[in-house]
Image (tube, rainbow, N blue to C red):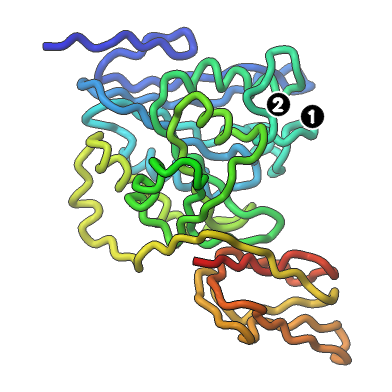
Amino acid sequence: MTPQKKIIILDEQINSGQKRILNLEIARLHTHAKIEIPVIIERAKVDGPVLLLNAGIHGNELNGVEIVREMLIQKYTKPDKGMVISIPTLNVFGFLNQSREFPDGKDLNRSFPGSKNGSLASIFAYHMMNEIIPHIDYCIDFHTGGARRFNSSQIRIAKSKPELLDLAKIFNPRFIVYANEREKSFRQASTTINKKVLLFEGGKSLDFNQRITNRGVEGTLRVMHHLGMRDFSKELENSKHNGTIIINSSTWLRAKYGGLFRFFVKDGTKVEKGDIIGVISDPYGRFEYKVKIPQSGYIIGLNHAPIVYKGDAILHLGFA
């Protein structure tokens, strides 16, 4: 029998067949109370792929937290082969405050690969990149739309990484969106050191949506099944979704006027040029502007804000 390799994470040895809950401790609150980020590690008795389930990099993006929580509570994260590392609330500071940023005002997802002598967010990114990421092979990074923007379920990958396309198709989201890696993002930093990252977008900030949760959980099970980490045939036998649509480019439709915004369409819908998808009006019944689609495409994101200003992004239109 081939001996299992020695794995040490956060100065703790992870033995075969073991579940460990470790804490990533980097900083304290201004009260000097410890801030601990739980890192849940489940290792099979047989070596294999290592998958990171990462959520809450923006503290107010709760639907990703819910997806990882559901994976944990259903014990889907216990592999028969390989290892699963689950971090449901990476930005626990923002999670506590229900805010996107770190306490220093920085966006953690624009702070990678970080520095041990930088800002708080940069220090945190540095420890993540040096203590967790070297152990993984794959990552599913869960996000939602921000600022009342609801994203249809989608996996974002870069066109320059064709090896991720097959894995994204296995996940089976509503859309696969070609999107460049953002400068200093977690995805860019991890990809640079040859980790395979699927960025999942679905739902909106400070909100749970069961449809998005189900899609995220089922997609993760599909990936684990495909990687040979565990047989989820039974859990997926009744899973039915429409085929995945690949989005090659996209644009945001912006409000031409400020006012009350009411939309008549559902995210994920195919729309044709000239379709009326909503109206912007004043509160007094004197003005009403019909929002028309300028080009046929798919609604991959939709602003749920009831009040918009001129220039606000109200609809994300994708083109296959």
For this view, does 231 lie left or right of residue 104? left
> The residue under label 1 is which amino acid type?
Asp
| Res 226 quadrant in image | top left
Q: Residue at x 82, y 67 (%)?
A: 311
Instruction: Report if the CB atoms under discs 2 and 1 are less than 8 Å apart.
Output: yes
Query: What secondary structure is found at the residue carrying circle 1?
Result: loop
From where the camera sits, is residue 218 visible?
no
**Helix or strand or loop: what does disc 2 sit on?**
helix
10 Å neighbourhood of mark 2: few (<14), some, or many (≥20)? many
Question: Which of the numbered marks, if any, corresponds to residue 104?
Answer: 1
x and y, in percent, of residue 287 in the image:
86, 89
Q: Amino acid at mark 2?
A: Ala
Quarter of the image where the N terminus is located? top left
Q: Is residue 142 visible?
A: yes
Which residue lies at the image location 74% right of the left edge and 71% below the top edge? 306
Q: Residue furthest left?
A: 1
Q: Point out the tag, 2 or 1, that comes first from the N-terminus.
A: 1
* Left or right: 216 as drawn, with respect to 45: right
The residue that appears at 38% across and 42% down in the rendered structure is 71
